[in-house]
């Protein structure tokens, strides 16, 4: 086990010894999942920081890039970054301030705003995609295609269980 997780694992064992009936394995896997998520997030943020981005802003940019005509409503953005509409508005403001995204009123409903990638935003994404690919390959190379397939199925099963 990774040395960064050992103190957490030891703590779980101490608590389980003090409180009978503790679902040891479930607690362990849950904490391990969160620990891996945090380490993965740190890795991504390190690679994005020099471009003035983080995992949240990257996810937002990629959502817009993957959308038809490279545009979305801010409410769609809040769903992909799993945050409130207020946070999505702040994120959109940040991306607009950086010149990566533009904001305009919808032709159908002037109360609705549309976020679109700018040329600068598209250029940055297309510059970072090869770097992102290398990072992903480095992280996931320890798994076979079959491992990744099983992992995908298990994560989707867990997502359904927790309400996703």
Image: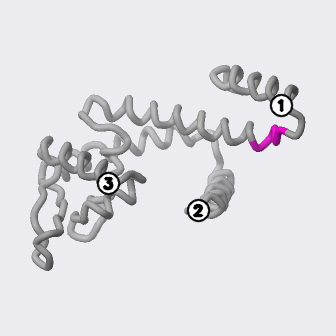
Secondary element at image label 3 = helix
Q: CA distance from mark 3 to mark 2?
A: 24 Å
Residue drawn where x is 30% and y is 45% of the image: 57
Residue with the most extreme front position: 19
User: Quarter of the image holding residue 79?
Assistant: bottom left
The image shows residue 135 at horizontal and vertical percentages of: 44, 38
- The crowding category of the residue bearing disc 1, from other C-alpha atoms within 10 Å (few below 14, some 14 to 19, many at least 20), is some
The image shows residue 98 at horizontal and vertical percentages of: 14, 41
Dots 3, 1 in contact, CB < 8 A: no
Q: Is residue 54 above or below residue 70?
A: above
Which label lies toward us, 3 or 1?
1
The image shows residue 149 at horizontal and vertical percentages of: 64, 58
Is tag 3's residue or tag 2's residue first in the polypeptide sequence? 3
Tell me if 129 is positioned left or right of 24 in this view.
left
Q: Which residue is mark 2?
A: 163
Q: Is residue 84 above or below residue 66?
A: above
Q: Which residue is mark 3?
A: 62
Residue drawn where x is 67% and y is 57% of the image: 154
Residue drawn where x is 83% and y is 38% of the image: 22
Q: How many marks?
A: 3
Secondary element at image label 2 = loop
Q: Which residue is mark 1?
A: 16
Would you say residue 57 is visible in this rendering? yes
User: Quarter of the image holding residue 34?
Assistant: top right
Range of magenta residues: 22-26
Secondary element at image label 1 = helix
């Amino acid at each position: 086990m990774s040395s960064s997780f050992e103190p957490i694992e030891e703590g779980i064992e101490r608590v389980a010894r003090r409180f009978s009936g503790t679902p040891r394995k479930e607690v362990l896997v849950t904490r391990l999942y969160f620990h891996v998520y945090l380490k993965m997030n740190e890795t991504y943020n390190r690679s994005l920081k020099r471009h003035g981005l983080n995992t949240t802003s990257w996810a937002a940019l990629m959502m817009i890039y993957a959308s038809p005509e490279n545009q979305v409503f801010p409410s769609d953005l809040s769903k992909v970054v799993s945050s409130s509409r207020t946070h999505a508005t702040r994120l959109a403001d940040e991306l607009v301030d950086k010149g990566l995204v533009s904001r305009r009123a919808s032709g159908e409903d002037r109360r609705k705003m549309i976020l679109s990638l700018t040329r600068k935003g598209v250029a940055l994404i297309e510059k970072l995609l090869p770097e992102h690919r290398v990072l992903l390959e480095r992280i996931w190379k320890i798994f076979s295609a079959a491992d990744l397939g099983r992992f995908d199925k298990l994560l989707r099963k867990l997502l359904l269980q927790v309400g996703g």
